[in-house]
Amino acid sequence: MSALLEVKDLRVSFPTRTGVIEAVRGVSFSLGKERLGIVGESGSGKSQTGRAIMGLTPEHAEISAKKLAFSGIDLLRVPARERRTLRGKRIAMVLQDPKYSLDPVMTIGRQIVETLRTHERVGKAEARKRALDMLQAVQIRDPERVYKLYPHEVSGGMGQRAMIAMMLIAGPELLIADEPTSALDVTVQLEVLGILDRLVRDRGMGLIFISHDLRLVSSFCDRVIVMYAGRIVEELPATELANAQHPYTRGLLNCMPQIDADRHPLPVLDRKPEWAL
Amino acid sequence: MTAAALALDRLRVTFDGFVALNDVSLNVASGESFGLVGESGSGKSTLLRAVAGLAPVAGGTIVVNGKPLGRKRDKAFYRQVQMVFQDPYGSLHPRQTVDRLLLEPLAIHGFEDTEKRILRALDEVGLGSGFRFRYSHQLSGGQRQRIAIARALILEPSILLLDEPTSALDASVQAEVLNLLEQIRADRKLTFIMVSHDLAVITHMCDRLMVMQNGEEVERLTASDLVARRVTKDYTRNLLVASEGFKRSA
C-alpha cells in the first residue's frame, strides 16, 4: 500500500525565554485513504502535529523530521510556493471554531469561491454554481441565502458546515480536522459529523481527526493514535479501544462520567512520570 | 419537603424584547443538587445569571432561603449565594495573585481572620499554600478552576451556582474537579445548581434535573429516570442519543 502521508520522527519545538518547549517529540505514523484519529489532552502535541503537516507551524518554532512526505512530496524541503499550492488544494484543514476561522468581513459564498478560484481556473459563474452545490452537499437547506450571509449571521453548526464546504470544494486528498465539532452543541455535533463522514467516504479522502474526545474519535475513525506529552503512547484500531493497554488510554476512557454507571468518586488519572519519557 | 433553598416563580428574563427565559418556575430543596441541561440558547445559563443578579429580571420572583429578593441584592445575599463560571481563563483577574483574589471577597464582607481562611480555602480545594502567591497565568486550567471554587467557598455560602464548571477542562481534569465539588457538597451540606450541556455530567452530579429549550422548561427528570431512559419528550431523547456518540448510518 502506498501511503498518502508518511510521518517519521516528527519534532516541533518552541524556543522560549525559559528554555525550549518540545511540543511534538518524535511522532511517526503513515496514513492511507483511511480515517485516523489523534487523541490527547491539552498540550499533548496533537494540534501541532496536524499543523506541521498542513505547514502552519509558527515561524519561530523549530520543526524537524526524518520524513514528512505527502504522496511522495517532501513537505519540509519543498519550496514555499509549491507548498502553497498543496495547502487548500490537496491538503485541507477544518478548524475548531467557525467564529474565528472564517473571514468576518467576507460573505460565506465569496470565501468559498475564493478558495476554488485560487486553486482552479474556473469562471465566476461556474465557481458560484460549484459553491452553491457544495453548500447543498453539506446539507444547507437554502444555499442561495447562506451564500450571501456573513459568518456572524449564521449559527455555529451552519458556520462549521460552510467551513467544511470551503475545505472540500477544491477536492483535497487529505483532510485534517482539528476538533471540528468541539465548539458545537451535542445534537449539532452529530449532524456535522454525519456530513463529514459521508463526504470523506464518498470522495475517498484520507482524514486525520484531531480531538480530545476519545469516545467520539473511536466511533468515527478506523484507527486511533493516543498522544501524551508530545509522543504517541498507543496506537490501536478503533474497535479495539476497549482493550487498550496503556494506562493513560485506559485512564482517559475511565474518567468520563457515564449515564449508566454510578461511580462516586470518579476514577482519576494517576499520571506517571514515565509516560512522558 | 424540606425548606426550599431556592424558589423561582415564573421567572422571566428579556433582552430588548427577546425572551431569554420564559416564565420558569423551580424549587430546589436545601442540600439538593439540581441540574439544568440544554443546548446553546436554551436559557440555562441565563437562569443562573438571573439568580446571581447578572441578568435583568423582567418578571417573577426569586426566593432564597425563604427571603424574597428585591431589585437590588444585599450583601447578605452574596454571602449565601456564590457562582463558579465556565471559563477559568476569563474569570480570574490576570494581574492579581491568588492571595489577592481570595482576599477580595473577605475584605468586602469584613472578615477578620483572613489569613486563616485563605489557607483553609486553598487547602480545601487541594492546592496548598504553595499556590498562594501565584498569578493565574502560572496555573493550569484545572488549578484555575479550583481557585475559582475556593473564591466562591471562602464566604461559606449555602448555595453554589455552577455554570458549566468543567466544560473547558480536559476529561481527566474534569473528573478531579467533579470529585472535588462532590466532596465539598458532602462536607458543607451545600445546595448546588449546576448547568451543563453534558447529560452524563449532570446525571453524575445531580439528583434532579430540568431539560430546557428556547428559554422554557421541556421536562423535569430525576437522575434515575435518565439512567432508565424514562423520558417523555423527543427533545430529551435526542439529547440522550447525541450523548451516546456518533453512529455511522448504514
Image (cartoon, grey):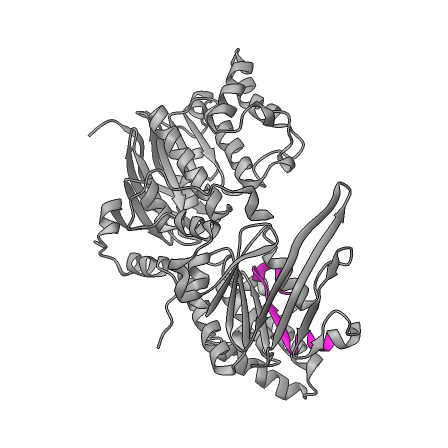
The quadrant holding residue B231 is bottom left
The quadrant holding residue A216 is bottom left
Region rendered in magenta: A84-105
Residue A104 visible here? no
Q: Is residue B209 left or right of residue A215?
A: left
Q: Quadrant of the N terminus of chain A?
A: bottom right
Residue visible at 36% across and 25% down in the picture: B187
Q: Is residue A29 left or right of residue A187?
A: right
The verdict on residue A5 being magenta is no
Of B160 and A240, which appears nearest the observer?
Answer: A240
Note whether A83 is above or below A210 in the view shown: below
Residue visible at 67% across and 32% down in the picture: B95
Report x, y in % for residue A138: 49, 75
Q: Is residue A179 left or right of residue A259?
A: right
Residue B129 visible here? yes
Residue visible at 53% across and 19% down in the picture: B119
Report x, y in % for residue B171: 46, 48
- Total marks shown come to 0
The verdict on residue A96 being magenta is yes
